[in-house]
């Protein structure tokens, strides 16, 4: 029996973690992936006809590629095949509420919202990374709820595995990311300053490492000036992340106060839990409720609250044996809620809705 074919549509970054995961899951579910990289997004449906692209079983528009949806819909409709879009974020939400590019009531914001709503409504399936984004797409962008399916980002289990920390390493609290406002890195820096004055350290040397590059890095470096317990490292290769995570004791998620920050589960949370490291992040309804009810190695504090973050770090580092247990719990939580098997079931549920499985 021939494998069903997915036409991966548009100029996407196929090695981006979300895309890598989706492609891996599709392969494991028995789908063949064919890439279509058009010269011009707006004219891609014409190019697909000229190139005589073979009819697939489904067309897939990956994350961040809202601009590709219209042409993909035109061509998929002509071929009578379903269209799946995986936007990951809302362009309207990002421009208006994260970047503050337009006031929410401005004509430009309303036009952007209508444009995105129309595109997403044209799809047969809209994938989202959290139930909070499902609510946003349904309530703000008017996408029918029966079209929306949650598929967590997860982490590549073949890469992100627990490893033993080198014994000579000092205790470390690790953040890694792209230094954007969503992350709330200023909260982390203020927490590290507070932590530096806490008596609970018991003479321990604890380093707060901020790894990565991005638009707010220079500002953050200036804020951290004079504090020897705060260090900065440049971004590293994706394949090196598991080893780097394993050399830390606690991994930090995001602490920004925006609605967007509350709607997401960051890549770093999945990856750290997969590597068996306890995680501290901001309170959010994006996480499974039962993950927060029990101890699964992930700890939640109020957004933009450096005092709470400093206190939580101090509490976790007080007992080294408990810290190891928290790490084991984190991996168990990952296995229970975010594993490849769990994500495969989520994707199967979505594909079943359009009779692809």
Image (spheres, grey):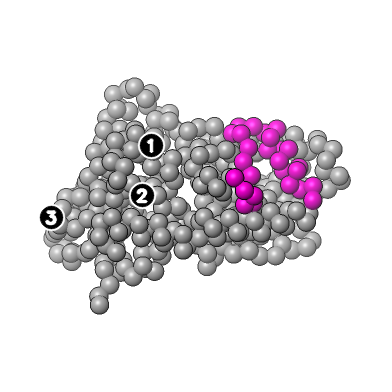
Which mark identifies residue 78? Answer: 3
Q: Residue furthest top?
A: 105
Within the image, what quadrant is residue 168 found in? bottom right
Q: Residue furthest right?
A: 203
Q: Note whether residue 16 is visible.
A: no
Which region is colored magenta? 293-319
Q: Which quarter of the rendered picture does the C terminus lie within?
A: bottom left
Query: Which residue is denoted by mark 1 in the rendering?
Result: 136
Q: Is residue 331 above or below residue 227?
A: below
Residue at disc 2, secondary structure: strand
Q: Note whether residue 152 is visible.
A: yes
Question: Does the segment drawn in magenta span residue 330?
Answer: no
Question: Does the segment drawn in magenta span residue 310?
Answer: yes
Q: Is residue 294 above or below residue 304?
A: below
Q: Residue at x 27, y 30 (%)?
A: 111
Q: Nearer the viewer, residue 155 or 175?
A: 155
């Amino acid at each position: 029996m021939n494998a069903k074919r997915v036409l991966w549509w548009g100029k996407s970054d196929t090695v981006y973690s979300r895309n890598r995961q989706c492609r891996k899951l599709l392969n494991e579910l028995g789908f063949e992936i064919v890439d279509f990289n058009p010269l011009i997004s707006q004219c891609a449906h014409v190019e697909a006809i000229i190139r005589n692209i073979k009819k697939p079983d489904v067309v897939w528009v990956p994350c961040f590629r809202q601009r590709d949806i219209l042409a993909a819909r035109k061509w998929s409709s002509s071929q009578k095949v379903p269209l799946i879009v995986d936007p990951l974020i809302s362009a309207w939400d990002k421009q208006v509420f994260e970047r503050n590019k337009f006031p929410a009531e401005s004509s430009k914001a309303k036009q952007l919202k209508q444009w995105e709503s129309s595109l997403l409504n044209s799809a047969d399936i809209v994938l989202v990374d959290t139930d909070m984004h499902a609510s946003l797409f349904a309530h703000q962008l008017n996408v029918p709820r029966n079209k929306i399916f949650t598929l967590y980002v997860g982490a590549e289990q073949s890469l992100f595995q627990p490893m033993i920390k080198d014994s000579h390493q000092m205790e470390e609290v690790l953040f890694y990311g792209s230094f954007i406002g969503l992350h709330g890195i200023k909260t982390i820096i203020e927490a590290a300053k507070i932590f530096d004055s806490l008596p609970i350290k018991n003479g321990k040397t604890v380093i707060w490492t901020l790894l990565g590059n991005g638009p707010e890095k220079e500002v953050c470096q200036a804020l951290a000036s004079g504090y020897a317990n705060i260090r900065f490292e440049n971004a590293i290769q994706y394949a090196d992340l598991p080893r780097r995570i394993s050399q830390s004791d606690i991994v930090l998620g995001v602490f920004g106060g925006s609605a967007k920050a509350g709607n997401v589960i960051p890549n770093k949370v999945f990856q750290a839990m997969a590597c068996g490291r306890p995680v501290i992040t901001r309170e959010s309804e994006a996480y499974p409720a039962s993950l927060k009810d029990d101890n699964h190695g992930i700890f939640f504090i109020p957004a933009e609250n450096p005092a709470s973050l400093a206190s939580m770090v101090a509490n976790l580092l007080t007992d080294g044996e408990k810290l190891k247990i928290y790490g084991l719990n984190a991996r168990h939580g990952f296995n229970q809620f975010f594993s490849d098997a769990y994500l495969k079931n989520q994707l199967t549920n979505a594909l079943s809705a359009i009779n692809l499985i």
